[in-house]
């Protein structure tokens, strides 16, 4: 879920083509949860193979990554490690919310109310160990690099950008700003037409960039102060925040120097300012291994061989054109 800074953070809408030539460190768990929530059947059930194994995450990961490569974007997926202990309360609350949504989904499905069933089904997404492993295996076969964070994926993605090993980080959550990411792109993994929950309306979801320095300048806050604002609103480390305090009131409190009156939060501030990250990673893009991709997606998970082969061809064609362009650039 992350912190809700949406209404106070300046954003710039962009076209996905604006990211051509850029490398993007993507919060992998965030992206996979998006795929699990969105890619579902009419009654809200996720895509599965004949063995009952969920495949929605792999479908989203494969075809969205193919689109990135075609657009000249170099994706680097960053996976979460062990969450900080302060996050366990949030994790437990999420489990409870999913269980409640699951019961409502079952009830709606039994009543034949597929619209209601799909709404609740999207709240039940759960990312299991085998899904994470299959995602990493697929990325490896596609020649796409991924990084394993020792803790929070968003913190590691921000660190990769700060080191200059990627141009931007990508996530739906605003926590990346708190972790110090210079630039954050949202809606990258879910861009396109999306249905508004509970309504028969569709909207165009487009990528948007948030520049960290622009955020601090527009709010006239330091990085530690924006973290304080987030804490008052509520973060994954103190869910719910301080009752009755929204973003605008939180800004006033911080600017007035009254943040300390609401409790002792040094541990949370330190988690954002000094997150656990690692230099133990290597970023290298390789050619896709067609046989391995087909074995994973088609043999094991029963994807359409024709569609997967077309996806592989799109990657190979894009990589070939990129290589030709580099050769021309070197020549001239």
Image: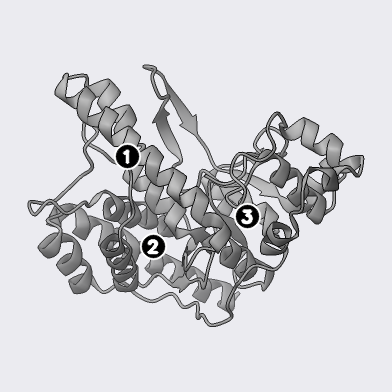
For residue 236, above or below residue 200: below
Q: Residues within 10 Å of mark 1 (few under 14, many from 20)?
A: some
Q: Quadrant location of residue 289?
A: bottom left
State the residue lying farthest toward the left: 50
The quarter of the picture where residue 291 lies is bottom left
Rounded to the nearest angstrom, the CA distance separating label 1 from label 2 is 43 Å
| 139 shown above or below 51 | below
- Residue at horizontal 64%, vertical 67%? 275
Q: Is residue 181 visible?
A: no
> Which residue does the numbered mark 1 point to in the structure image?
99
Residue 76: % across, % down: 48, 66
CA separation, marks 2 and 3? 30 Å
Residue at 81 percent across and 50 percent down: it is 225
Classify residue 293 as left or right of residue 281: left
Q: Which residue is mark 3?
A: 176
How much space separates mark 1 and mark 3, taking CA atoms?
28 Å
Number of marks drawn: 3
- Residue 318's disc number: 2
Q: Position of residue 201 (x, y in %)?
A: 41, 19
Of labels 2 and 3, the one closer to you: 3
| Mark 1 secondary-structure assignment | helix
Front tag of 1 and 3: 1
Q: Which residue lies most toward the right here?
A: 256
- Of residue 164 and residue 308, the one placed in the foreground of this image is 164
Residue 93: where, in percent of width, then height? 45, 44
Residue 285 in view in this figure: yes
Mark 2 element type: helix
Left or right of 281, for residue 276: right
First in residue order: circle 2 vs circle 3: 3
The residue shown at (57%, 72%) is 329
Q: Residues within 10 Å of mark 3 (few under 14, many from 20)?
A: many
Q: Which label is found at residue 190?
A: none
């Amino acid at each position: 879920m992350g912190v809700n800074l949406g209404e106070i953070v300046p954003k710039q809408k962009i076209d996905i083509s604006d990211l051509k030539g850029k490398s993007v460190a993507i919060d992998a768990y965030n992206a996979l949860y998006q795929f699990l929530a969105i890619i579902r059947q009419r009654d809200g059930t996720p895509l599965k193979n004949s063995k009952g194994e969920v495949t929605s995450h792999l479908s989203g990961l494969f075809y969205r990554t193919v689109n990135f490569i075609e657009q000249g974007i170099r994706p680097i997926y960053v996976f979460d490690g062990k969450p900080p202990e302060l996050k366990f309360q949030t994790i437990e609350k999420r489990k409870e919310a999913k269980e409640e949504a699951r019961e409502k989904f079952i009830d709606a499905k039994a009543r034949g109310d597929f619209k209601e069933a799909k709404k609740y089904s999207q709240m039940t997404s759960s990312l299991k160990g085998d899904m994470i492993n299959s995602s990493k295996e697929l990325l490896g076969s596609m020649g796409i690099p991924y990084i394993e964070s020792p803790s929070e994926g968003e913190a590691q993605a921000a660190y990769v950008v700060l080191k200059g090993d990627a141009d931007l980080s990508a996530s739906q959550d605003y926590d990346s700003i708190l972790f110090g990411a210079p630039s954050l792109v949202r809606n990258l993994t879910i861009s396109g037409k999306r249905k508004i929950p509970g309504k028969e309306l569709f909207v165009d979801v487009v990528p948007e960039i948030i520049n960290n320095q622009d955020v601090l300048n527009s709010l006239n806050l330091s990085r530690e102060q924006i973290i304080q604002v987030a804490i008052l609103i509520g973060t994954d480390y103190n869910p719910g925040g301080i009752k009755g305090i929204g973003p605008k009131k939180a800004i006033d409190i911080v600017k007035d120097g009254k943040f300390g009156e609401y409790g002792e939060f040094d541990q949370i501030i330190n988690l954002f300012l000094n997150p656990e990250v690692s230099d133990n990673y290597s970023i290298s893009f390789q050619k896709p291994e067609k046989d391995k991709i087909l074995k994973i997606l088609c043999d094991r998970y029963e994807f359409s061989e024709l569609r997967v082969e077309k996806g592989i061809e799109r990657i190979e064609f894009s990589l070939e054109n990129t290589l030709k362009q580099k050769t021309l650039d070197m020549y001239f």
